[in-house]
Image: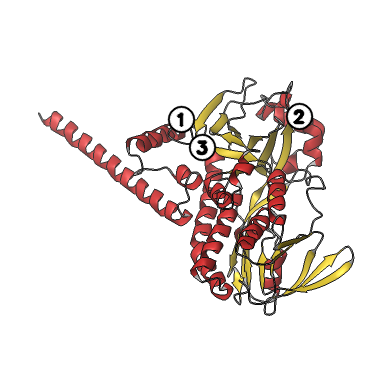
Amino acid sequence: MTANGDVAIVGAGLTGCLLAGYLARRGERVVLDERRPDPRLTGAERGRSINLALSERGLDALRRVGLDGTVLAGALPMRGRMVHAGKGADGALDFQPYSADGERAINSIGRRALNNLLLDAAQAPAEVEVRFEHRLTGLDPATGALTFETPDGPVHAGAAVVLGADGAGSAVRGELLRHGATTETLDFLDYGYKELTIPAVDGDFALDPGALHIWPRGRSMMIALPNPDRSFTCTLFWPTGGTESFASLSSPAAVEQYFTAHYPDVVPLLPELVTEYRENPVGLLGTVHCAPWQARGRVCLLGDAAHAIVPFYGQGANCAFEDVVVLDRCLDDTGGDWSAALPLFDRERRADTEAIAEMALANFTEMRDKIASPLFKLGKRVEHALERALPGRYVSRYELVSFSTVPYSVVRRRVRAQHRLLGAAAAGALGHSGAVTALRRKS
């Protein structure tokens, strides 16, 4: 525990709320500051929600504080990808299971619903105070002095430990940069995202709710995730410039024409297509690299504030929740000494976040360009066959990332080793076949 003063957590999003609960369990006094009004009393920010795909890493973090069952009660399991490969009106479908046995699932849940659940849980312990409409405008990493802008004017506060869980545009990271306590690199894609909605049809799902739907279109794609109200949240991932991009569709007629040509099977399911397309904003996609994450053993960044990644492996929230577990373990390992735990967290976690950032970018290419190809589908069938034949010895990258808590950096090394062995085995088999063929010719 801190010797004097509170732990200040900046950002009452997913990471900050879960972190507050973990620290309250340790007996820490926590003040959780959020720049927005209470999201339980206001609507979601239009067009910015992006449904989450909650998988084992996130569930493990929730399970440790008894929240997994509550969260899963509002989630929908998706056991595979439903690929809408054809551009015809019939929308030819191809279901690709995520696991070898076809039973394991990732879980679709709305960001707002999950945030509200975690906020309720964070506020339950007496050790946690939550303050809304507190926007961080100043931080001294040396002293823990904080300044917030509020509707009633500036508020000054202090804390023994300050934890930045305030997202990719982190104000805490900005203050560390201003004080020369960290460096950052922002790698933005020349792609953005925009949300649309497929409402329920006659009170039922318009598409199969047991799958994550993908419309791969080469340089672009659309996905759709189910919601408990039987709607689907669609997300377009398109280039931001050039032809066939967000910038190129400037009129209602152009929007309708483009969707009819590229997503004809879904056009009848989007009654507000033109309105939503024109009114919902285009969000940015990028990766945040920051080093170090901590300063003076008293200020530290977690989740997207430290290492935001692109969403194409569905691991952003899962990775952030795992950060909380790792930090909790570092506090255990250092006897609750924050000055030792924060540098340890930085050292132990960095390789894993760099690994998932790399894998998330690679998965974008896979989802956008490859999943509809016969060669890719054959490779997945072979991979699942190997998993069934060699249980525990051969495990696909997707299963290791989504259905285990094996560290991301270990996943990357293991998958590379598996691929090398498979390559060697294939070369050996081809060599053996060639030798046999040559012998037969000689005879």
In three-dimensional space, the C-alpha distance between marks 2 and 3, rounded to whole angstroms, equals 26 Å
Q: Which residue is mark 1?
A: 374
> In the image, what residue type sits under mark 2?
Glu
Q: Crowding near pointer 1: few (<14 within 10 Å), some, many (20+)?
A: few
Q: Quadrant of the rendered structure where residue 307 is?
A: bottom right
Q: Nearer the viewer, residue 77 or 292?
A: 77
Quadrant for the C terminus in the image? top left
Quadrant for the N terminus in the image? bottom right
Labels 2 & 3 near each other (Cβ < 8 A): no
Q: Is residue 296 above or below residue 276?
A: below
Q: Which mark is residue 370?
A: 3
Residue 301 rendering spot, x and y as whole percentages: 63, 65
Residue 271 rendering spot, x and y as whole percentages: 78, 27
Labels 2 & 1 near each other (Cβ < 8 A): no
Q: In the rendered view, does 315 fall on the left or right side of 10?
A: left
Q: Is residue 61 above or below residue 426?
A: below
The first of marks 2 and 1 along the sequence is: 2
> In the image, what residue type sits under mark 3?
Lys
Q: Crowding near pointer 2: few (<14 within 10 Å), some, many (20+)?
A: some
Q: Residue at the location (57% across, 34% down)?
A: 78
Secondary structure state at the residue bearing disc 3: helix
Secondary structure state at the residue bearing disc 1: helix
Q: Which mark is residue 256?
A: 2
In three-dimensional space, the C-alpha distance between marks 2 and 1, rounded to whole angstroms, equals 30 Å
Q: Quadrant of the rendered structure where residue 237 is?
A: top right
Q: In the rendered view, does 349 fall on the left or right side of 388?
A: right
In three-dimensional space, the C-alpha distance between marks 1 and 3, rounded to whole angstroms, equals 9 Å
Q: Which mark is residue 306?
A: none
